[in-house]
Image: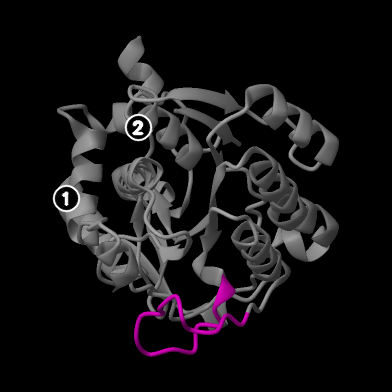
Amino acid sequence: MRLAVVGAGGQLAAAVVHECRAAHDVVAFIRSELDVTDDAAVAAAMERTRPQVIVNGAAFTDVDGAEDRPVEALNVNAFAVRALARAAAALDAALVHFSTDFVFDGHASAPYTESDAPNPRSVYAASKLLGEWFALDAPQGYVLRVETLFGRAPDSEAPARGSVAGIVAALLAGTPARVFEDRTISPTYIPDAARAVRYIIDERPPAGLYHCVNSGRCTWVELAQALADGLGVEPRLQRTKMAETMLRAARPLYCALANDKLRAAGVDMPAWQDALTRYVRSLTQGRPPAQILHPEKARG
């Protein structure tokens, strides 16, 4: 089966390429090779490649920056998805698209399900919700909501990115890691999400919306403490509350997601604690802290 993976330079899309390339013909497009905001270029690239599945990993992820650049956020997170959905429909191909927990307002007290009504509170969140609607308009559209992504493809040599990687760097450097004590999340280990994508591609469960996160929930403080325990370092944490920050865009306080629908479809996502253990093991592997912080040192 031929797969077209768009935005393949991103950590999640790169992991999908790694996970699927042994069993499928994977054509990966990085940003310099395909401008997803150019509808004609998207249509031409997909017509030339003729995939059976399109995986969209392209995204505008600067949550605060979207408040100042709403057109750019909408072009990448919404209208580019519309172009990919149209290309998928023309080729009778499936479309796999990633969304976010930010589509919710965070006022819940139990993990959100796919049937809960979204209520975005920022430009970024609104652009992602619109992208969901366009993706689900495709005849074979899958939307996977992920959050708090951490980890990367096993063969990746790119520097780790994201909040979890930042906490790891602070813990290993012995500097205080700033973490929210009042935000509740369901973290997503990138290799686990990539395996879920492979299952969807291979098994084709019913198209639609799924929460693709590791099982369970935690606060950022609990996550950081678990990281410190796994790394064997003192958890020097600077606890803070969302109300104390000067972030431009609103974030949902409670944004845990339930993944029961994905489990019923055949994908049993491991607990976040198990995922974090495997993540820490992938970081350490007998290396000293300097090589964890700067992986290029391991290659001399």
Give the number of the disc on residue 230: 1
Give the number of the disc on residue 19: 2
Q: Quick one: SS at disc 2?
A: helix
The secondary structure that most of the magenta stretch takes on is: loop
Give the extent of the magenta segment: 103-119
Foreground pick, 162 / 264: 264
Q: The N terminus lies in which quarter of the figure? A: top left
Looking at the rendering, which quadrant does residue 117 occupy?
bottom right
In the image, what residue type sits under mark 2?
Answer: Glu
- The Cα atoms of the two marked residues, 2 and 1, are separated by 26 Å
Q: Is residue 108 magenta?
A: yes
Provide residue 294's location: percent of width, then percent of height: 39, 28
Q: Is residue 49 left or right of residue 273?
A: right
* Residue extending farthest top: 300
In the image, what residue type sits under mark 1?
Answer: Gly
Q: Residue, x 64% and y 38% (percent of image)?
A: 91
Q: Residue, x 71% and y 28% (percent of image)?
A: 47
Q: Residue, x 63% and y 76% (percent of image)?
A: 250
Q: Is residue 152 magenta?
A: no
Provide residue 133's location: percent of width, then percent of height: 65, 66
Specify few, some or many for label 1: CA neighbours under 10 Å numbering under 14, 14-19, or 20 or more: some
Q: Residue, x 66% and y 47% (percent of image)?
A: 89
Q: Quick one: SS at disc 1?
A: helix
In this rendering, does residue 254 appear at all? Answer: yes
Give the number of the disc on residue 104: none
